[in-house]
Image: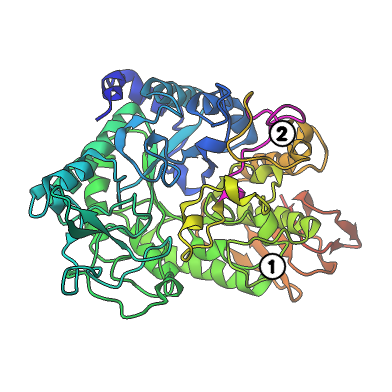
Amino acid sequence: MSQQHSAAPAPTPTTDAAVATVARRRDWWRDAVIYQVYPRSFADSNGDGMGDLEGIRARLPYLRDLGVDAVWLSPFYASPQADAGYDVADYRAVDPMFGTLLDADALIRDAHGLGLRIIVDLVPNHSSDQHEWFKRALAEGPGSPSRDRYHFRPGKGENGELPPNDWESIFGGPAWTRVTEPDGTPGEWYLHLFAPEQPDFNWEHPAVGDEFRSILRFWLDMGVDGFRIDVAHGMVKAEGLPDLGDHEQLKLLGNDVMPFFDQDGVHDIYRQWRLILDEYSGERIFVAEAWTPTVERTANYVRPDELHQAFNFQYLGTHWDAEELRAVIDRTLDAMRPVGAPATWVLSNHDVTRHATRFGNPPGLGTQIRLAGDRELGLRRARAATLLMLALPGSAYVYQGEELGLPDVVDLPDEVRQDPAYFRGAGQDGYRDGCRVPIPWTREGSSYGFGDGGSWLPQPEGWGELSVEAQTGTPGSTLELYRSALAVRREQADLGAGDAVEWLPAPEGVLAFRRGDFVCVANTTGEPVTVPAYGRVLITNGDVAETGGEAKVPADTTVWWTAG
């Protein structure tokens, strides 16, 4: 294990005190706006072309001024980076490319001083193949206790040359890799639902649960405010690892309960974790990345004694269509209400094409798209969709750069791509690099203010005109729209937490709902529509004309009104 462990500051009373400084109210997470930072691509402090913790720390005032409540950091742990840090070699160390544990401690403390909370990624489904446990399992050979911490199995066929079952990797190809044993002979196979460099833990083994409970305490003692749980629907596998009997398994994902995903046993793990979290002051939280067939099954993860939030991927995948949006909003609120959990709303993240590009393409292309589409249309719809999202009851997530209206970079040269799915042939489309291009801070410079030494993925020409510098103080810019919307959201008592909306009559293709004195109208059509003027306009992404108690709302425009 890394020597960085010894650099971790000993927990002191000031840790809890720092957390208390951001505890403005109880249940803060029920209406929080949480900003996702992808550390590689946010800000580079040392000019090596790779973002780092010191870069993030220096930009925390920007996030405070943007108006978010918390910052979620994608993995920065020690890792060979086979999957951008989601292959963890040491869960208690910071990878040198991002800094040190002292840098992490300073970032957490500075964030708390600015009134921001810090949520870190946790990757419990699998480790890196460079994790000490896995290296020991390989070295000790078949039958060793170390192999029981992962899923090692003999192969099928006369000489064990076939995988133990027919499961397929999410990244394409079989979910099993055969190892060469210490004596040089072909040997057992190990399970990896993602890349071969990411062997799955065996959560039936008690040492795995013990280890992760210890990891939780390590970071909670450091002062983090919560964890986003990667592949929260994974970890537990069906007894006997049964064959699926289907060779187009990836098409089933999100539609069926799989023998390796969304098994009921995961909930026992989260009940144990919740007991640990509740020992700490400051209302720390868990957020689940849980891909499930229905929002009703997602609700199982956020029962009162389990996790606090779960990402709403059904909403993320919904087209810019009033009927579809209303259906998923109703279904989400109806599913969350019985378990007392807040709904969450998200439009973009590090795994999907940015919504400013998705909404500029025809519906039905999925969430990974290689086409630039209609840039003007996509941005207009993205801005309207953001206002709709921020008006809904519950918590909202913002992915870095969406507040700049960044499009996906769809024309990256093949030779610079790093998404492991891209190199696996089948599986995911493998074009996640397009949403991970480092964001622009300034109009000029080798990497538009990202850092002094270029950027690990090439930025497009013209990126500077979308930068923070170019948009700050510019009327009508996407950045100022976000800043204004988040400020209004904080000021309006009827916005934020809650579990219901009152739908209002509206023309076809238009969503209209009331929350107290607040009214939101979203026109998802390509034409202007006329609706009642519901009071004073708070904010809109288009030019709304009001005459005689009526308002003409342009195409792809959302309006916030208040009667108060």
Contact? badges 1 and 2 (CB < 8 Å): no
Provide the secondary structure element on which disc 1 rests.
strand
525 versus 72 height, above or below = below
Viewer-side residue, 497 vs 524: 524
Q: Which residue has dot 1 on it? A: 511
The picture places residue 356, in percent across and down from the top left corner, at 69, 54
Height in image: 335 above or below 376?
below
Rendered image coloring scheme: rainbow
State how many labels appear: 2
- Viewer-side label of 1, 2: 2
Which amino acid type corresponds to the residue marked 1 in the rendered image? Leu
Q: Residue at x 24, y 70 (%)?
A: 162
Residue 381: x %, y % from top left:
73, 59
* Residue carrying label 2: 468
Number of residues whose C-alpha sits closer than 10 Å to that of mark 2, classed few (under 14), some (14–19) or many (20 or more): many
The residue stretch that appears in magenta? 433-451
Give the quadrant of the N terminus.
top left
Relative to 472, is 393 above or below?
Answer: below
Residue 162 position (above or below residue 480): below
Residue 434 sits inside the magenta stretch: yes
Q: Is residue 85 left or right of residue 35?
A: left
Q: Position of residue 180 (x, y in %)?
A: 21, 53
Q: For the residue carrying disc 1, how many other residues have a C-alpha within 10 Å: few (<14), some (14-19), or many (20+)?
A: many
Do we see residue 300 in this rendering? yes
Question: Residue lying furthest bottom in this view?
Answer: 245
In front of the other: 465 or 198? 198
| Dominant secondary structure of the residues highlighted in magenta in the image | loop
> Tag 2, which secondary structure?
helix
Hey, what amino acid is under mark 2? Val
Query: Disc 1 and disc 2: Cα gap in Å?
Result: 31 Å
Residue 461, position as x, y percentages in the image:
76, 40
